[in-house]
Amino acid sequence: MKNFKTVAALRAFRQEITSKGETLALVPTMGALHKGHLSLVELAKTKADHVVVSIFVNPTQFGPNEDFDSYPRMVEEDSLKLKPLNIAGVFAPSVSEMYPNGYASTVSVSGLTDCLCGAARPGHFDGVATVVSKLLLQSRADYAVFGEKDWQQLQVIRRVNADLNIDCDIIGAPIYRDEKSGLALSSRNAYLSTKELASAETLNVTLRSFAKDIRDGADIDIATADATQKIINAGFNNIDYLECRESESLKRVDQFDPKHPCRVFVAAKIGSARLIDNMAV
Ligand code: PAF
């Protein structure tokens, strides 16, 4: 498994495999890898001849009062987890490699980013769109795999890829859930105490019954109020959003219509962790 630290080294590898007519899949991550990330790698391996995992805690997608400083960084442990998967390499650039002195460009997507995490975390998707554009252009990956847990992020990345003609095949991978509790795996789950973890495990259960109520024709406002109460009762301190939106456009849904696929989305805080989840209605 190669260890790429510079864009030049990654590019040289890309050229080498291109000359042999081979393909590359990229799995962009911020590290602190868990089974969910490893499932993205497994999916990537089914698509391309070579897989590279990028590990970069991207400063531009964190707000001033967010957890950039405390975000877990463990590139060596992450590399050990990746070794058995027989991937081509890890791309773990420094901040100055990704954002050299004088860096002044931002990729910004309008519309899709006005709601959900875009509204709750101003500037977040500019950071994501910028770093993902850079990673896709640096690697010239044929495929890139992203988890559906960050559903809005996936739609934003699809938009950027199409709008900027990056020409990568963007693949969404199903949310990896804890087998027993259904909790969506996240690097931020590491922030949870045992008691908070027990509360966190109720989030997917509430979201599932919220989705079912909507599917069964419940009034969405009433279903939202009911699910909100359950989340607060479970011990969450704050709910950033709990909403039903169209799956692709992310437009708000006022009345369920089986002809238009929609999903329910939640972001809620417990202790110092902000957890997100979503599922199809
Ligand atoms: O989903 C993530 O881990 C990050 O937002 C991503 C896509 C790696 C960009 O930094």
Image: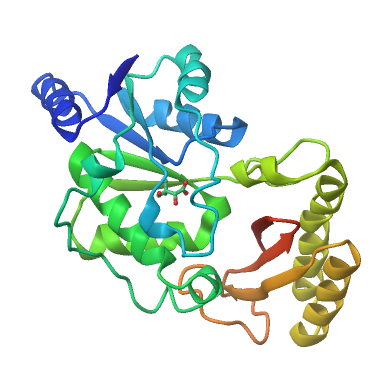
- Determine if residue 205 is in view: yes
189 left or right of 116 in image: right
Taking depth in this image into account, of 112 and 169 the one nearest to the observer is 112
Quadrant of residue 28 within the rendered picture: top left
User: Residue 221 appears at what percent x and percent y?
Assistant: 76, 86
143 left or right of 151 in image: left
Taking depth in this image into account, of 172 and 38 the one nearest to the observer is 38
- Residue at 38% across, 19% down: 87
Quadrant of residue 267 within the rendered picture: bottom right
Q: For the N terminus, which image quadrant?
A: top left
Q: For the C terminus, which image quadrant?
A: bottom right
- Residue at 45% across, 79% down: 114
User: Residue 162 appears at what percent x and percent y?
Assistant: 25, 61
User: Residue 55 appears at what percent x and percent y?
Assistant: 40, 35
Q: Is residue 147 above or below residue 279?
A: above
Taking depth in this image into account, of 143 and 239 the one nearest to the observer is 239
- Residue at 29% across, 62% down: 160
Q: Is residue 105 above or below residue 57?
A: below
- Determine if residue 140 is in view: no
